[in-house]
Image (cartoon, rainbow, N blue to C red):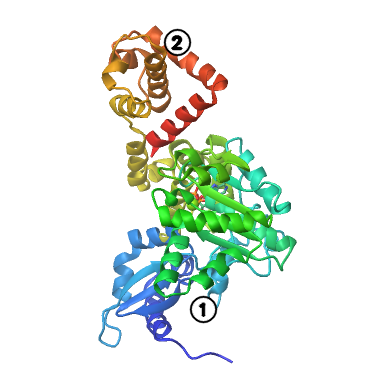
Amino acid sequence: MRKEETKAEIIWNEAASRLQRQLHKTTYEQWFQNILPVNLDGNVIVLGVSDDFFADWLKDNFDDVLSDALASIDDIDYAYKFEYGHTPEKNTRGKTALKEISASPERSESKVKLPSKRPSNCLSRHTFENFVVGEENRYAYTAAKTAAENAGLYNPLYIYGGTGIGKTHLLQAVAHESLIKDPSIRIKYTTCEEFLNNYVDSLRLKKHAEFRSSVRNVDILLVDDVHMLANKTQLQEEFFNTFNTLYNQNKQIILTSDKQPCEIAGLEDRLVSRFESGVTTEINAPGFETRLAILKMMQEEHLVKLEDDVLQFIAANISSSVRRLKGALLRLVAFASAMSVSAISVEKAETLLHKLLEEENASKTISLEAIQRAVAEHFDIRVNDILSSKRPKNIAEPRMVAMFLCRKLTAFSFPEIGTAFGKNHATVMNACKKVPELCSKNENMRRSVSLLERQLHN
Ligand code: ADP
Ligand code: MG
């Protein structure tokens, strides 16, 4: 029996039929058919979409169209906002566009195992099958897969690395994989922020016991972005107790973060040592080949196919995050679909991606001074010491690290970097050779360099 339509559904149905009349059929199917009216908040309709790319793209390209479609419905101009995490399966508005386009011959649903149930806050496409493995993420991938197959073996598993490079994907893949193995397993996936909000609400609403049971009566606890624990003493206390309860029962805990435990500001020592007590693995941004493979996999989901040279252009020029890579692909596919063009040239791609490429470049231009400052601060010395000719180890080593990072993170030449340090190019070359050697001998140095690199990247 069909349930009665909610107010949000009635409004969205009206807007959707206006959109359908106005837009090209493929455009409507690709971008709007799958939107789910979640609820109505005053005159703001909450629209459920799969993820932030989708929402960003709609906002960037169809804001006017959407606002128009939602205008003067029963004399009210409705505004909209998006909510992520709504997958096509949940959408009951007939045929689902995303599902339709993801059914490529190579990756048909029948080939990709999907559990019959899954945590509602995990995206169905975040599976191990959909994760492209390269040198940079192999270790993290293997560790996550092992944890999913042998719960409790790596406990806790701690995955850290920059943004947009697959941490959440892997964490949710564990949820899917574990449920395929054992459909009765109890899994909780939560972001650290959600953990915080639910914890605070539970205190306010005097429902602390319920909150505790929601995170403690589970077989696997997956917590995303635990760097959010930084400087939050009370939250850390709660987290510590949750962690211990599960750990002592040998329940699997997996955490992700953009930092190593010891780098999270104000994280209590006892949590640092708990987090480090299992397996800690870094995930790095994928290199060119992996990026290209990711693009090829992602484009299988779309009706429009881009030529290899265009994919290579994207992979070569967008390296900072997979999220951005995906954004670029989506933009081109959407353009081709909206305009009903079958091919996009590299030149056209360059024009369409202009804004994204600029952002990418801006994120890459790190100044030499910024590196000198960050290094000085990290090693607790002054920039002037770095620029001096002082030889003691506590100054000479940071100076070499700064030179090494200047070379690694910027496009400046050896002589140019030398000049910025008041030294010659040979000194810089020597530093670039020495720092990796220092890192291989000294774990603290390796951690410092890796932390600085990530800090400067962000
Ligand atoms: P993070 O949590 O590290 O910020 P996400 O896991 O959210 O990053 O990844 C960002 C986007 O990139 C997601 O859509 C994810 O599916 C995709 N992604 C990241 N790495 C890979 C990969 N190796 N293969 C396929 N997709 C990837
Ligand atoms: Mg994430």
- Residue type, mark 2 in image: Asn
- Numbered tag placed on residue 430 in the rendering: 2
Name the residue at 33% across, 41% down. 358
Residue 39, x across and y down, in percent: 41, 79
Identify whether 227 is placed above or below 213: above
Residue 429 in picture, x, y percent from top left: 43, 12
Q: Quadrant of residue 44?
A: bottom left
Cα distance, mark 1 to mark 2? 64 Å
Residue drawn where x is 59% and y is 92% of the image? 1
* Residue under the point 36% across and 76% down: 45
Earlier residue among tags 1 and 2: 1
Q: Amino acid at mark 1?
A: Arg
Element assignment for label 2: helix
Whether disc 1's CB lies below 8 Å from ligand 1 is answered: no
Q: Say which of 297 and 308 sits in front.
A: 297
Q: Is residue 16 above or below residue 52?
A: below
Do we see residue 319 in this rendering? no
Residue 41 higher or lower than 87, as above or below: below
Task: In this rendered view, identify the residue nearer to me: 438 or 353.
Answer: 438
Task: Say what secondary structure mark 1 lies in.
Answer: loop
Residue 26 vs 159, above or below: the answer is: below
Instruction: List the residue tagged with mark 1.
Output: 93
**Which residue is more in the foreground, 148 or 97?**
148
User: Residue 215's x, y, as percent?
Assistant: 56, 64
Depth check, front residue: 415 or 397: 397
Q: Between tags 1 and 2, which lies in front?
A: 2
Residue 144: % across, % down: 64, 48
